[in-house]
Amino acid sequence: MVINISFDEHVGKITSMAFNLFLFLGTTINQPNLCPSTTWYTNAITFANSTTVGTNVYGVFVSINNTIYVANRQTNKVVVWFEGSINPDKILSGSLSAPFDLFATSLGDIYVDNGANNHRVDKFSLNSNASNSVMSVPNQCTGIFVDISNTLYCTAYTSHQVVKKWLNDSVLTSTIVAGTGTAGSTATTLNTPIGVFVDAQVNLYVADCVNNRIQMFPIGQFTGITVAGASAPGTITLNYPNGIILDSNGYLFIADTSNNRVVGSGPYGFRCLFGCTTSGSASTQFISPTTLRFDTYGNLYVADNGNNRVQKFILASNSCSIYYNQPTFCSNALWSVNAITFASSSTIGTLPYGIFIDGINTVYVPNRVSNTILSWPQWSTTYTSNSYSNLSNPYSLFMSMTGDIYIDNGYLYGRVDKYIFNTSNRVTVMNVNGSCYVVKLLLNNGTTIPTIAAGNGSPGSLSNMLNSPQGIYVDSNLNLYIADCANNRIQFVQTGQLDGVTIVGNGSSANITLNYPTGIVLDANGYLFIVDSYNHRIIASSYYGFRCIVGCSGGGSSASQLSFPQSMAFDSYGNIYVTDRNNSRVQQFALQNNSCRKLFVYNSTL
């Protein structure tokens, strides 16, 4: 038995939020509420270059009203842009000396490192062009932070310590809050601390640079806990981390400086976000990124130190309601004619069937030969082979928002199995048998016996019948879409109904002919993308009707061709991945253009 799995994540409570409502009470800095599947466009915009911010730019800050501040270490000035500005709106001088970092409060006061020669932190009051000293420090502050209690922190990196001072006190003297003043790698020592962050509970996070770790000091404690990097198994390997920030859920985002990348954590662990291939000066690359900050919309600004620029990465997707990708496409969207072979038969075995891409762009493919599930993290060409007990000839799979994976195990055992996130614990969630119908089951209801969602168990072409159904999809209204293969049609079954309506193929008015369709996906606008298997192509609908988008030159094995493709999936950037069954490979077709044309109507009265 072949089972296609689709998982309905709209049953239950889903909390929605305004897309730009990111600031939470009790914080002094932008902390977006980021979903597990949040992605950003990886091609950055250069917000500022060396002409404006000087060379070896380090400190950048984005306030809660989206004013951007950058410390120019060459000119000893602070450069300020108000929200929406392209050119600087203000330049602050003062008596600064090679300032590293800076912090702007909600009141508009700016605190700037002035430790190189002056051993202090200076404050520019709101609308003031002059600064005054507010805290004495041992040396330069590579990290500055003001917490919710109005306490100022400085990472004095050459003294291997973090110091602080309550700003409501007129005394300039600072006190040690982390580190002993001697370099070390114990829980009470630091070695060249750089970035600093203080959460709403006043827990202190320090980028302990030379120790390649992130240390968390609970409020009032001098003993740190390693939360990422060295000696924290299951996190990520860091190489001289500099900047650090937390989102509103307490997940870490780190400038992994000597790895020339930015990484982030989430409920399913760490992942690389930007600079994930090689170092360089392209829009997707860094050379020694240092500080990173969010604006209120979730866009990320990064000081790209070695490239003498500040890069802005635009938020692409932040949907918390689904854990797969539904991009928004224009009617004239184009994909590359020639695909890249993402995985070949030596990796995925012969005759691949299913594919799933989660919201953070991890690609999953069942290997039906080895009875394993292969996974590739975003940007990685290295896969992990995941073995599961008593798995036989798995065709398809689905991952839920909780990270649990549901795998077809019907070929030999007649069931769907669930493997709990990050464990090998297996639970049989649904028993399946028979053919020519689609079944469903409400999870956690105490039974593994499903109910029929479509079809009557006998092959046929009536509205209540199916013939060799394969690909399925469930939309946000719980309507079911079925690739009814042997009937050469796509059936739409409205929620609560058993009779289907043919929307594409035999018996429909659609302007396209299907030949054994096997896969179906919807984009964010509800337009259909269909794996038209025996026509060896992928077709898509839009406002203007159907068109072929890839594999449009007939079946074959070239980069532009497919041979009996089976399934497809999108990543969050709109690239298409296809299991090219008879070529025993997975092909990736890159999205090339998604710029929507505008129609203009000209009215003239004579």
Image (cartoon, grey):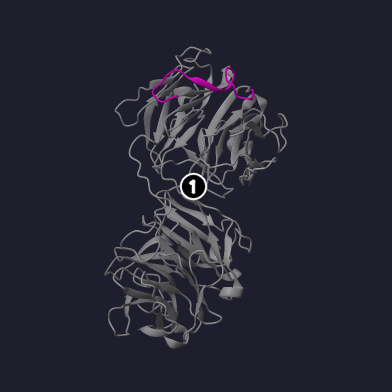
For the C terminus, the image quarter is top right
Q: Which residues are magenta?
A: 494-513
Can residue 354 be seen here? The reply is no
Q: Pointer 1: what residue?
A: 360
Q: Amino acid at mark 1?
A: Ile
- Specify whether residue 505 is painted magenta: yes
Which is more toward the observer, 331 or 464? 331
Which residue corresponds to the image point at 42% horizontal and 39% vertical from the top-left?
A: 400
Which is more toward the observer, 208 or 346? 208
- Specify whether residue 499 is painted magenta: yes
Can residue 120 be seen here? The reply is yes
> Residue 509 at what x, y percent from top left?
59, 21
Which residue corresponds to the image point at 59% horizontal and 42% vertical from the top-left?
A: 330
Q: Main secondary structure of the magenta part?
A: loop
Residue 496, quarter of picture: top left
Residue 448, quarter of picture: top left
Rendered position, 316 above or below 342: below
Numbered marks: total:
1
Rendered position, 263 above or below 592: below
Which is more toward the observer, 288 or 21? 21
Residue 347, quarter of picture: top right
Q: Is residue 515 left or right of residue 209?
A: right
Rendered position, 330 above or below 66: above
Residue at the far front: name it: 606
> Residue 393 at what x, y percent from top left?
51, 28
> Residue 281 at what x, y percent from top left?
63, 64
